[in-house]
Amino acid sequence: MSRRILLIFIYVSCVLSAFAQNIKSPSQFLGYEIGTQFTYQQRIADYFKYIATESKNVKLVQYGSTNEGRPLVAMFIASDANIGKLEDIRKNNLGLAGLGDNGTASTNTPVIVWLSYNVHGNEPSSSEAAMQTLFDMVDPANNRTKAWLKNTVVVIDPCLNPDGHERYVNFYNSVKGSAPDANPAAREHAEPWPGGRVNHYYFDLNRDWAWQTQKETQARVGLFNSWLPQVHVDFHEQGYNSPYYFAPAAEPFHRDITAWQKEFQTIIGKNNAKYFDQNGWLYFTKEEFDLLYPSYGDTYPIYNGSIGMTYEQGGIGAGLAVTTRMGDVLTLKDRIAHHHSNSLSTIETASANATKALEEFKKYFDNSRTNPNGDYKTYVIKNDNQDKINALAEVLRRNGIQYNYGVKTNASGFNYINSKTEQFDINAHDMVISAYQPKSVLLHVLLEPKTFVADSNTYDITAWSLPYAYGLQAYGLKEPIKVAPQQMNSGSPSPPLTVSVNKQHAYAYVAAWQSVNDVKFLVELFKKNIKVRYAEIPFEAGGKKFGAGSLILARAGNNNVDFDDNVHYAAMAAGRELTPLTTGFVDKGVDLGSSFIRYIHPPKVMLVSGEGASSESMGEIWYFFEQQIGYPVSLVNYKNLDRARLGDFDAIIFPDGNYDDFPSDKLQSWVKDGGKLIVLQDAVSQLAGKKGFDIKRKDTDTGKTKPSIRIYGDRDRESIKTSVPGAIYKLNLDNTHPLGFGFPKYYYTLKLSDDVYTLLDDGDWNVGTIKKNAYVSGFVGEKSKEKIKDGLLLGVQSMGRGSVVYLVDDPLFRSFWENGKLLFSNAVFMVP
């Protein structure tokens, strides 16, 4: 009897074991062959959840959610021996980076490979490949991948941009027929505006890694920085006529990228090529995709010690099948196969080189702490604006960069404003950042005043130095300054608290106007129906000085018993400091009843969207109103503008874009009746020369140029002579004009084109002008550099009872150009 029970037990165990071994492939789970249709994001998440329940070698983590409520997940995969020790492995890895107990950290630990898929929603083949890669890594019958997991932890993030992915898949599935139409002219190959590339607010998440303006990025980079993998791959698609691209990357490389990081890119690339060669698949390397701009999915990991790489499969707009220029039919199955091959190849190569990868990882961070790269060993950020210091501190904190306060001494350093080395005092409230820290390389890349560009043919902007972006005075010191230890997660000093107010005797309250936080306060006041005024010129009262633009909350006109409470609560909510005044008679300047004290009418704002508008430019403005200052804005599609009642709006904003049949006459009539038209970038150019609008392009041609002999092989080099891929210029700013309130007499702008305009006519206002020697940092082609001088970049034209505000550059660029947010707010709220 006991023998029979034993046999039954063995039989049942074998059956259960066989059942446990039978993990479903993506095709089996989904009910269709992978690659024959696009998989909805929820089904992708379901497959990852299914694997999490069926495999003992994984751990599924939901690390955040999107604006539309979709989950962001990552799967951690490890061997039997390591899956239960993930937290120990993570802590040890941070120890290797000097971010934990590095005294006990060991390089005898698994190498970490992180694979990120589908950051651009309309590049969806990689999410399909992510499912297949996951299956291969957990398939009990796959001895090849089992071997890799002995010394490797693999992290798979199947979809970095679920909202964009769903926008694309919903579009495609709604227009496809019973069979894919491979003709490139078919409608299934032409997405409607805004396309699936971007997230809910139309941000390109692949340019947000360092700035972390979007909630998806904040969550993802937070998880990434809590692990710091040795290898990171960002999977993309490019135009469907291009073959596959993988590392090694193209020039220019930032000077801080190490020899090992370059070498290991080549090692991985050669292994990828081996499998592509076996299959006869076309590919290219060392072209187009450089390693400079710090906020990509390849460069950000590189500046954090990883081997960061971009893989690009041809396929944007390809749908399920498309005929390429070569006459071949590229299918979704093909695209999945290529990404899948390189996913496994990368893991294989990392596993084969795990010991070296870990040793070099530790060396990278050891050097950062003891012998940092770069000209400057200390950065000092002057605290001339507490709000901007706090905003910068938050970005540094999210990136794990240590900073400190409390230093009082004098020093000599490079002045970012005048580009001179000079003596200056460091005060206790100034931010002091030592380069001797684990994140030294990232610190240097983000703060260096000029980024060296060895090869000017770059893929993105070439200047981003944060002191200029935040409008803060900074110094670079070539000598270290000893500072007390500062915890990375320590925030900056708290925003100033509102002072106590005498509610019975306050004639008026005054608040500063010098940052986007003051804009938030203004919005809070509007919500409480408090009438707000601003001072057109500086004044002194109550022993304090107040600059132009200062907000005045007078009891006159606010005859409400709750006036003091409402003002006080609004100030508390926005963290603003109020100065109560007992009289309208000021010590110096104009009294509070003067005509130079102007009323701020809460404007009803229209933002033009839809076809014609740049989705990313429009998204920056939408996000600013809705998520950053909480002010209502109506989004009106350009094609519906004729049906809109313009009289319902006080301000209309045209973002960058190319608008067919620009309605200049209709808009001009509306402006004359008291409207305010705000136009940005290419929208400015579409008004240039139009009757009634004073804006005119600056003509730099001195005569007819003679034809020259051009070398065909130099055509790419010739084209960059008129290229401006993001460069910083210093404008002269009329800060007595409402568009310049809250600023010094200069403003740093990020130029993305060589557009410059002639000065506006008398009677109008040339608020931001550029001179010959205004260049600060970044690459500018020689022809464009000659053009960007002696002209207008910020202007206001009076027209009847209204005005037109010209913003030639983007003040809200990717939402990280912090100093432009106040400028844009001035255009909306302050310009009369």
Image (cartoon, rainbow, N blue to C red):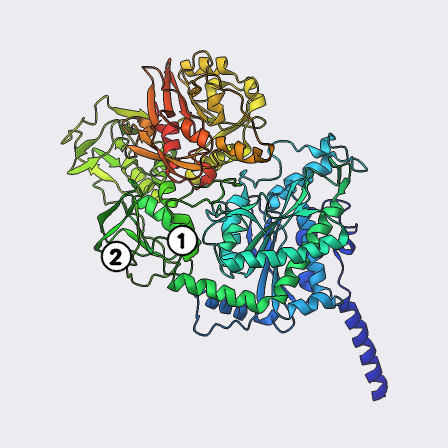
Q: Secondary structure at mark 1?
A: helix
- The x, y position of residue 769, in whole percent, is 34, 26
Residue 222 higher or lower than 647, as above or below: below
Label 1 sits on residue = 443
Q: Residue at x 72, y 30 (%)?
A: 187
Q: Is residue 674 left or right of residue 502?
A: right
- The x, y position of residue 5, in whole percent, is 83, 84
Q: Amino acid at mark 1?
A: Leu
For disc 1, the neighbor class at 10 Å (few under 14, some 14 to 19, many from 20) is many
Q: Secondary structure at mark 2?
A: loop
Q: Residue at x 28, y 31 (%)?
A: 549
Q: Looking at the image, do the residues carrying marks 1 and 2 touch, with CB atoms under 8 Å apart? A: no
Name the residue furthest bottom: 2
- The x, y position of residue 291, in whole percent, is 52, 48
Label 2 sits on residue = 406
Name the residue furthest left: 587
Q: Amino acid at mark 2?
A: Gly
